[in-house]
Amino acid sequence: MLLQPNDHWCWFVGKDRHLMLDLGEEMLFSTPYQQKRLLCADDMHQSFSVEDTGLYYTFLDKLSCVATPSRRVQAALNGVAVARFYKPLMPQSWFFEPQADYHKPQLGELIGLECSARHLTMMVVETSPAASLCISLSADVELNESKTLPVFGAIKVMNDRLFSLEGNLAEEIRRVG
């Protein structure tokens, strides 16, 4: 079942200091993002905006190959949360292999990154000519001895590290979805 945004949806910070989305009818969506990584106050209550709705549907559309509707909704809502509230990040491209072909991704595009001979599937939630902010759709991956990128974890990467999953998309998603 895909959730349809309405006027009652509202962002807020929960008691556990995570960003939450009140979906009405006693339903809550908890993001994995702690307040210390976000640009929002303790007492924040912001409606799910028209822009949020547009991003949500863009992400859902791009995630159409993900196996389950609940996983699509979860990824789309986390993408909106990062795009709207995440603190600006500096690129951390050194974890990933440079690619021969420079790829300029589209908003919501599913892209790949290579890290220690492992392929990661990511969704682009913010783009610029040089770098893209992405969330991971892959299971938790250890980037080095001290840093792990969790599923739905946000990271900014230079575009010369990204590669398109257009040709391999179905196979990539089966592995992670």
Image: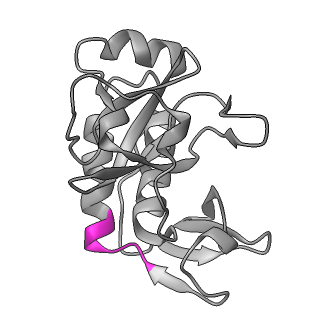
Q: Position of residue 167 (x, y in %)?
A: 23, 12
How was this image coloured?
A: one colour
- In the picture, measured across the screen, residue 164 lies left or right of residue 24, that is left
Q: Is residue 141 above or below residue 92?
A: above
Q: Is residue 81 above or below residue 154?
A: below
In which quadrant of the rendered image does the N terminus lie? top left
Q: Is residue 140 magenta?
A: no
Q: Please tell me which residue is depicted at 36% across the width and 61% down the height of the picture.
A: 5
Which residue is nearer to you in this view: 114 or 45?
A: 114
Q: Position of residue 34 (x, y in %)?
A: 69, 65
Q: Please tell me which residue is depicted at 49% across the width and 63% down the height of the picture.
A: 89
- In the picture, measured across the screen, residue 27 lies left or right of residue 109, that is right
Q: Please tell me which residue is depicted at 44% across the width and 74% down the height of the picture.
A: 8
User: Which span is picked out in magenta?
Assistant: 47-52
Q: Please tell me which residue is depicted at 23% across the width and 20% down the height of the picture.
A: 166
Number of dots carrying numbers: 0
Q: Position of residue 15 (x, y in %)?
A: 78, 75
Q: Is residue 156 above or below residue 93?
A: below
Residue 139 in view (yes/no): yes
Q: Quadrant of residue 63?
A: top left
Q: Is residue 24 above or below residue 66?
A: below
Q: Quadrant of residue 169?
A: top left
Which residue is nearer to you in this view: 9 or 62?
A: 62
Residue 9 in view (yes/no): no
Q: Position of residue 104 (x, y in %)?
A: 20, 41
